Image (tube, helix red, strand yellow):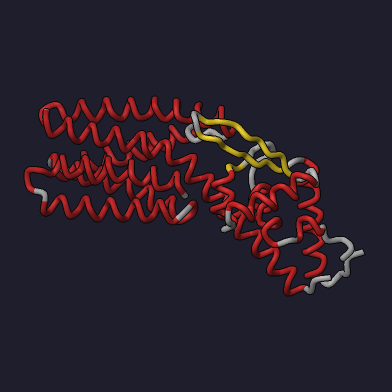
Amino acid sequence: MTGLDDIIHQPLRLRIMAALNALPPGTGLEFAKLKKLTGATDGNLGAHIETLSKAGYVAVDKAFVGKKPQTTVTATAAGRGAFARHVAMLQEIIAGQPPE
Amino acid sequence: MIDSQQASEALADIREIARRVRQSRIYNLASLLMIMWGALVFIANAASFGWPRHAGYIWIAVNVVGLAGSFVVSAFTHSRTGVRTFDLRTLMAFLLFFAFGLATCMLAHFGPRELGVFWAIYFMLFYTIAGLWVGLAFVVIGVGISALTLIGYFLAGNWFEPWMAIVNGGGLVLGGLWMRRE
């Protein structure tokens, strides 16, 4: 599958990246909000965020708000670039141009 | 390799998620203002019930505090998200909206009870129309509070102001809290 980003292409990771890319650069989403938006379970979401993080596509920030731990996930510049290329590739497929 | 059907589905999924994120962001930004105005409206209605002769001054004071508070909330939101929820243009829109309402009240010679109903429904009309563009929650809140306001007008008797404190003020606070969860 040349052209399409294998890391982003997985459905849940695509949703995670779509959600994070809808925000202004540098703005993140809390884990709980991301879970609600993507419809994922805790474990599933955590595993896929880990995969995206290892690829350098998202940054994960863990902090305490009061006594509650809060995880915020933000798309990195590399992640935004990869997502934009992936979307462009999907559009090319629809337009009937085979990926290079 | 995926086919064009699968690519279309993936793009539709992306668009839907992006729409939900934008809506969630709008709800989150608007909810603080809604909660603040709800608390003020609750206080104004309760105070008008306690001191009916001073109701006019109470509502003027609440509107001034509300406008000042809107700028404070906007500054707080801006420091966290970079988005201004209340700026000079919004203030101008509010003043124009308010002036039109004031002119209507002067021409229509409303009594105190009708004034209470008019302003509540007039502001809820704004919420409802805005909701057609920014999200269903605004429509539900606007139509719901308007309907409860009319019920109170006909059925609440001497308890109209307390009814309005709960329905209009409480409704906005609850609506704002609900929007924060979305």
Left/right placement of residue B30 relative to residue B169 reads right
User: What residue is shown at x 78% (from left), y 70% (from top)?
Assistant: A94
Where on the picture, by quarter, is residue B144?
bottom left
Which quadrant does the N terminus of chain B fall into? Answer: bottom right
Residue B146 at x, y = what percent? 27, 52
Residue B39 at x, y = what percent? 30, 34
Q: Nearer the viewer, residue A13 or B83?
A: A13
Can the viewer see residue B87? no
Can the viewer see residue B69? yes
User: What residue is shown at x 38% (from left), y 48% (from top)?
Assistant: B127
Residue B136 at x, y = what percent? 43, 56
Left/right placement of residue B4 relative to residue B38 reads right
User: What residue is shown at x 10% (from left), y 43% (from top)?
Assistant: B159
Q: Nearer the viewer, residue B45 or A51?
A: A51
Left/right placement of residue B54 relative to residue B68 reads left
Where on the picture, by quarter, is residue B169?
top left
Q: Residue furthest left?
A: B158
Query: Taking A13 as reference, is B29 above or below it?
Result: above
